[in-house]
Image: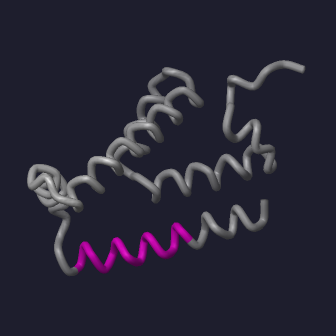
Amino acid sequence: MIFFRSLLVAMIVILSAYTGVVVANHGMDLLTIFFADMAAMQWPGQFNLDFMFMLALSALWVLWRQGVSLSGIGLAVCAFFGGALFLTLYLLVLSVRTQGDVRKMLLGRHMPAH
């Protein structure tokens, strides 16, 4: 679990720094570029479509894990638009709250009773 948490922290730091540089150099106009690449039907667009589907799967998992509730929907929206930055933070918090129990981290309220 120490390695996993260290990896999550490293991802948070690296992605935050990289995002900060990109925003400083290019502004916040991500969606225009993101969808324009997809409309061009080239490799960058294919990557964006693939990535968007991964974001959707991440959001659906968060919604399922949290339960369909106001907080679950809110976290799912954060997962979709926050990407890896959200997911790394979410998993880091879950790893602490569940004391490193991976089954509890992944299944949440859906844990089978023993």
Q: Position of residue 95 (x, y in %)?
A: 71, 50
Q: Is residue 42 left or right of residue 99?
A: left
Vertical placement of 108 versus 58: above or below? above
In the rendered image, which quarter contains the N terminus? bottom right
Q: Which residue does the image show at 68% across and 32% down from the upper left?
A: 107
Q: Is residue 18 magenta?
A: yes
Looking at the rendering, which quadrant does residue 30 occupy?
bottom left
Q: Is residue 94 left or right of residue 45?
A: right
In the rendered image, which quarter contains the C terminus? top right
Quick one: which residue is furthest to the front in this view?
42
Vertical placement of 22 versus 87: above or below? below
Dominant secondary-structure state across the stretch colored magenta: helix
Of 72 and 39, nearer the camera is 39
Of 49 and 77, nearer the camera is 49
Q: Position of residue 77 (x, y in %)?
A: 38, 38
Q: Is residue 78 magenta?
A: no
Q: Is residue 59 left or right of residue 21?
A: right
Q: Is residue 52 left or right of residue 72?
A: left
Magenta-tinted stretch: 11-24
Quick one: which residue is furthest to the right in this view?
114
Q: Which residue does the image show at 69% across and 23% down from the upper left?
A: 110
